[in-house]
Amino acid sequence: MSKTGKQEILNAIAAPLLAWYDVHKRTLPWRGTKDPYQVWVSEIMLQQTRVAAVLPYYERWMQELPDAETLAAAEPERLMKLWQGLGYYSRARNMQKAAKIILTDYNGRFPQTSKELRRLPGIGSYTAGAIASIAFGEAVPAVDGNVLRVAARTAGIADDIMEANTKKLFQKMMEEAVSQDRPGEYNQAMMDLGATVCVPNGAPDCENCPLAELCEAKRLNLQNTLPVRKKKAKRRTEELTLYLLLRDNTAALRKRPEEGLLAGLWEFPHLPGTLDEDAAAQALRDWGLTPLEWRKKITGKHIFTHVEWHMTGYLLTVKGGGDDFFWADYGTLQTLAVPSAFGKFLEQVLRQMDSRGKI
Ligand code: SF4
């Protein structure tokens, strides 16, 4: 089919899609609002994260940081705590940077066009499109993985959606296809259709799809072939030995560097490789610590986008130095932003320290 034919199919999506949305839209706390701040927070949280997981985070965030002003003024530590468990922490840090810019450069008023929004830290073309269309009615698309999938299937486009050029092509085609009258609802309808009907894993529910009559993938039985996505590079594996050190009713932590993976968050001290008890004890001596009682060996795994951590943790009581570490008592440990990569280990440490701070 010619490019024009594919564009015509995409242009025909709006009417059946919006009619379907009027009946089937999901009820979500950020739906029905035109407040750009609320739209922004929800869209950033929803990147790489499922709706069900986002809901409690969104509620907590809005209670504590209901607008750009409170976000700009929030303590970074508190911000990380509110984000703890969502992953990709740079999203929260970028939001705070953007909130400060909104206050200083825009007098606290949100920029209203997708072009201006894209200038803010952490706001790419998808998020800018979502905010501009939902909050300000600008007729721009919000092209994310859902839209790429639905559009590739409907129009029968077999280009590799991992390629930058393909994304550009879809962006252009969707700019023409987006509803001029109801762009915000159009974009939200695409999100809902991609999440509930034209799903990424498993068979799409073509029988209940408002686009079924237009859809090339359905007509040619290509639902499992489209969209085309080249294989990702294999993740590398890193082995780590974690020290879960308990001393005088406190546990040892240190802060990660301000740049890179999990930047600025708290972690348990660790060394590369999987060390046995003897080798692990040697490092303790280097830190000026003497082991008292080895209590537990705990193993765990955490998968990031490009790397997989295989962790072995030693839970033990110690005495002596450890001057490079921050020694947190039970209450403090619960307030610190420790990433979910260490969640299993944190749980075990807290279990050893009861609520009265006794180990
Ligand atoms: S008909 Fe099937 S493949 Fe086509 S858009 Fe609908 S759910 Fe997706």
Image: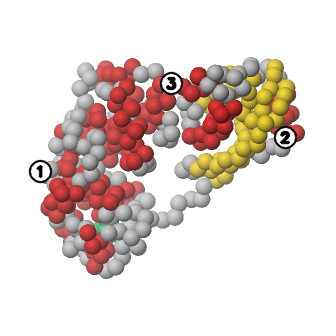
Q: Earlier in the sequence, mark 1 or mark 3?
A: 3
- Location of residue 336 in the rendering, given as x and y in whole percent from the top left corner: 56, 27
Q: Quadrant of the C terminus?
A: top right
Question: Mark 1 belongs to which amino acid?
Answer: Asp
- Give me the C-alpha separation between circle 2 and circle 3: 34 Å
- Decide which of 147, 292 is in the foreground and name it: 292
Q: Confirm if mark 2 falls within 8 A of ligand 1.
A: no
Query: Disc 1 on helix, strand or loop?
Result: loop
- Give me the C-alpha separation between circle 1 and circle 3: 42 Å
The residue under label 3 is: 77
What residue is drawn where x is 63% and y is 35%? 346
Question: Mark 2 belongs to which amino acid?
Answer: Glu
The numbered dot on residue 181 is 1
Q: Quadrant of the N terminus?
A: bottom left
Foreground tag (1 vs 2): 2
Q: Confirm if mark 1 falls within 8 A of ligand 1.
A: no
Within 10 Å of disc 1 (Cα), the crowding (few <14, some 14-19, many 20+) is: few
Q: Earlier in the sequence, mark 1 or mark 2?
A: 1
What residue is drawn where x is 69% and y is 23%? 358
- Location of residue 260 in the rendering, given as x and y in whole percent from the top left corner: 57, 37
Query: Disc 3 on helix, strand or loop?
Result: helix
Q: Quadrant of ligand 1?
A: bottom left
- Give me the C-alpha separation between circle 1 and circle 2: 67 Å
- Location of residue 249 in the rendering, given as x and y in whole percent from the top left corner: 71, 22
- Residue 123, can we see it? no
Within 10 Å of disc 3 (Cα), the crowding (few <14, some 14-19, many 20+) is: some
Within 10 Å of disc 2 (Cα), the crowding (few <14, some 14-19, many 20+) is: few
Say if 202 sits above or below 317 in the image.
below
Could you say which quadrant of the image residue 66 lies in? top left
The residue under label 2 is: 277
